[in-house]
Image: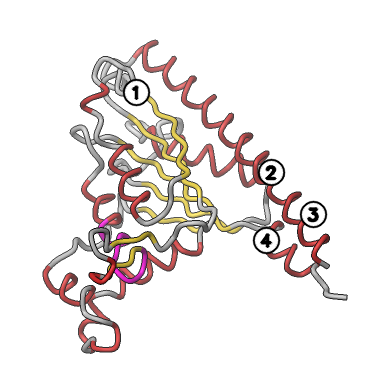
């Protein structure tokens, strides 16, 4: 009889969590003066997750303090050159991008602290997006496919993303008074969806510029949303594990 225990274990006992912070502020607003709300929320999510699943692997990336290099002409030349035809300098030009893509491909869950800067994502986070949305690695391109030559390469991998935001004003959520000015979460959804990651969850703090009780209430709501998201994703993970185990046992 086929031994399915090892395959069940590899799929259900551990997960790879990629934790990304994008804020230019180095500290957390719950522990540091002038600290970041998004670092506060992302840390809360990961800490609660680790309490429930201490065996899961956490890979931390701080693009706010150590941003990836921006895409330039050499990068584009290298990325769009077929791997077999690349010159040695091209491998060097793509080395950081390769590391970032490998990190993303290995992740089951991506938790992103993502503040809004001037209605969109911070430049340092956009640099990460530009490095991981890459032809031949995360999306495919073939002119012979006709009118739609592109396809996502990370689809059907079960990856999930949690976007934890912060905004100075309020009313940016769908249906809000200034939702049309929010180009933060939607731009990330578009970029990740393009490479095949479509399951995205959100929570955000608003009213940072107002302060006082208005901000305090928003923080409480956002933290409760974070806690609920952890519970929701842990519960769904348990259902997936049960289903995987049942299917593997049936196939034994």
Of callouts 2 and 1, the N-terminal one = 2
Of callouts 3 and 4, the N-terminal one = 4
Above-or-below relation of 7 to 57: below
- Figure quadrant of the C terminus: bottom right
Label 4: which residue?
11
- Name the residue rendered at 56%, 34% in the picture: 229
For discs 4 and 2, the disc positioned in front in the rendered view: 4
Of callouts 2 and 3, the N-terminal one = 2
Judged from this view, the residue extending furthest toward the left is: 73
Above-or-below relation of 124 to 86: above
Asked whether the beta carbons under mark 2 and mark 3 sit within 8 Å of each other, the answer is no
Point out which mark residue 52 bears: 2
Q: Position of residue 27 (x, y in %)?
A: 38, 40
For discs 3 and 1, the disc positioned in front in the rendered view: 3
Q: Give the magenta part as a residue range.
A: 130-138
Circle 4 crowding by C-alpha within 10 Å: few under 14, some 14–19, many from 20: few
Query: Residue 236 colored magenta?
Result: no
Point out which mark residue 246 bears: 3
Circle 3 crowding by C-alpha within 10 Å: few under 14, some 14–19, many from 20: few
């Amino acid at each position: 009889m086929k031994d399915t225990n090892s395959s069940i274990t590899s799929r259900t006992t551990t997960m790879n969590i990629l934790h990304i912070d994008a804020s230019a502020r180095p500290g957390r607003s719950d522990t540091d003066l002038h600290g970041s709300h998004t670092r506060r929320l992302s840390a809360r999510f990961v800490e609660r997750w680790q309490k429930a699943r201490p065996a899961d692997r956490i890979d931390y990336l701080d693009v706010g303090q150590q941003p990836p290099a921006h895409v330039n002409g050499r990068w584009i030349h290298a990325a769009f050159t077929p791997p077999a035809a690349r010159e040695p300098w091209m491998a060097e030009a793509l080395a950081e991008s390769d590391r970032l893509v490998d990190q993303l491909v290995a992740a089951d869950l991506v938790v992103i602290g993502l503040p809004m800067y001037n209605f969109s994502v911070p430049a340092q986070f956009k640099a990460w997006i530009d490095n991981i949305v890459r032809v031949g690695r995360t999306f495919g391109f073939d002119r012979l496919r006709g009118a739609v030559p592109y396809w996502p390469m990370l689809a059907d991998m079960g990856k999930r993303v949690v976007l934890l935001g912060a905004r100075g004003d309020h009313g940016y959520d769908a249906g809000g008074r200034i939702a049309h000015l929010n180009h933060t979460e939607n731009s990330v959804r578009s970029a990740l969806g393009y490479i095949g990651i479509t399951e995205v969850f959100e929570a955000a703090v608003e009213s940072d510029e107002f302060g006082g009780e208005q901000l305090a209430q928003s923080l409480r709501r956002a933290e409760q949303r974070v806690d609920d998201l952890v519970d929701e994703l842990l519960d769904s993970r348990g259902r997936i594990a049960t289903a995987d185990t049942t299917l593997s046992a049936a196939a034994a």
